[in-house]
Image (cartoon, rainbow, N blue to C red):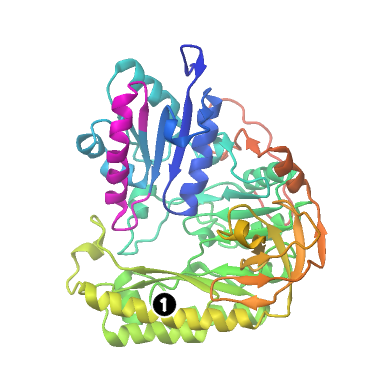
Amino acid sequence: MTTEFEGTPRTYDVRTYGCQMNVHDSERISGLMEDAGYVRAADPDAADVVVFNTCAVRENADNRLYGNLGHLRPTKLKHPGMQIAVGGCLAQKDRGDIVKKAPWVDVVFGTHNIGSLPALLERARHNEEAEVEILESLEVFPSTLPSKRESTYAGWVSISVGCNNTCTFCIVPALRGKEKDRRPGEILAEVRALVAEGVLEVTLLGQNVNSYGVEFGDRLAFGKLLRAAGEVEGLERVRFTSPHPKDFTDDVIAAMAETPNVCHSLHMPLQSGSDRVLKAMRRSYRQEKYLGIIDQVRAAMPDAAITTDIIVGFPGETEEDFEQTLAVVREARFSSAFTFQYSIRPGTPAATMADQIPKAVVQDRYNRLIAELEAITWAENKKLVGEKVEVLVAVGEGRKDERTGRLSGRARDGRLVHFATGDLAPRPGDIVETVVTYAAPHHLNADGSPLSHRRTRAGDAYEAGRVPRLKGVSLGLPTVGVPAPLPATTGGCAL
């Protein structure tokens, strides 16, 4: 299949909304498009194909998508060869309704058939009509697809897709399906392939990352996987997101503490501090268990930075319930938090619950939560003034870097650091050691000269304009024919 039109390769632009899983899927979409002969548009506004990879979690997701589609309509009318594709969770939810609401859309594809996109685009162009293809179960695991990574120094590695939980506020299980786990050997093969390209940091990704292994009957599989990743030569940082408190086991804490390249950073969604609300949410843990996990993590790793998700205004939440959330926030002392005002998502059990909270009440509680969190994160960050931090230099983390003359990156615990470079010239992907001189609620500054600068292969790749391109690593599901031999695994991760 060729994508050339009148001898010129067609261009594409992928626009991503939502979670890390969508960011990872967009890398796969870019890899598919380039394998099919498209090239990334130098000017996104002039792309021949625009792909929206959508999110359905937030209330305004629908409005945002249809607003953006509306803005593109005049452009498409002026350029008849242009195509628009909509994928991701909102596409899985709305299906053919997208074409009814925005008939200038050419392709709608879901979360289970990303690999079909180039063929759907070609079919829509040939037939001159919209193609809508939504599958009810996973067609191929996303990591079997080619990818074009956005970073030379950090990469997402999906270890599972889907979720077996039934949280009443969440539509993701209905859109992503039941949990499907990759085999450990396949995950480690992808990690090694990224490291061979110069990547220093890998984030293991799953909708419920620490339930990994449920599909093949090993409840300790995630801790084993962390230890096995620790043996990958050249891999300097391992992160993971997002775990569920109900699946958080002692062996994972031990693996984090005992594996040198696993970062002492933990994102642990709380959602609410009220046992009554947690029960209504169908979150199968309670305040005592949650705080117990935090205590265990801090006992094993006193320097751990713990972040969280919190929802304010869930149906039926009382002032007493909200005060319980504030009490957990004060005790847990998070280094940062993603905070959300509850919004109705059609298709979820919570959408039809009684006692929906008035907007004014939700806003007041939200403002109080933010004020509490900001005071705590600022106090926690102030404790780091004068401390040495190791920073992986990044692209695009500091909005004011050009004006201030600083560069930015992430410390090992995940905190954002803006730092002066002195006489050095570090590149994205290089490692800098520096000393914190100032703390704000959401970042640290280091305005002295760096203590050291280590040039890395990731920095070399950035300087040369190279990003990792992987052809995909198999899930290891049954296929026709004799399967290829699997790579050897280490660290107790049995296939």
Residue 29 in sight here:
yes
Q: Please tell me which residue is depicted at 59% across the width and 43% down the height of the picture.
A: 150
Q: Is the magenta stretch mostly helix, strand or loop?
A: helix
Q: Does the magenta stretch include residue 331?
A: no
Q: Is residue 184 above or below residue 48?
A: below
Q: Please tell me which residue is depicted at 71% across the width and 40% down the height of the picture.
A: 487
Q: Is residue 111 above or below residue 117?
A: below
Question: What amino acid is found at the position of numbered circle 1 in the picture?
Answer: Ile
Residue 13 in the image: state x and y as whole percent.
46, 35
Q: Which of 58 and 300 is in front in this view?
A: 58
Q: Does the magenta stretch include residue 58?
A: yes
Disc 1, SS: helix
Q: How crowded is mark 1: few (under 14 residues within 10 Å), some or many (20 or more)?
A: some
Residue 214 in the image: state x and y as whole percent.
51, 56
Q: Which of 282 and 62 is in front in this view?
A: 62
In the image, taking residue 131 as reference, residue 495 lies left or right, namely right
What span is in magenta? 55-84
Residue 273 in sight here:
no
Q: Is residue 489 above or below residue 117?
A: below
Q: In this view, does 398 lie above or below 467?
A: below
The residue singled out by tag 1 in the image is: 370
Residue 364 in the image: state x and y as whole percent.
29, 79
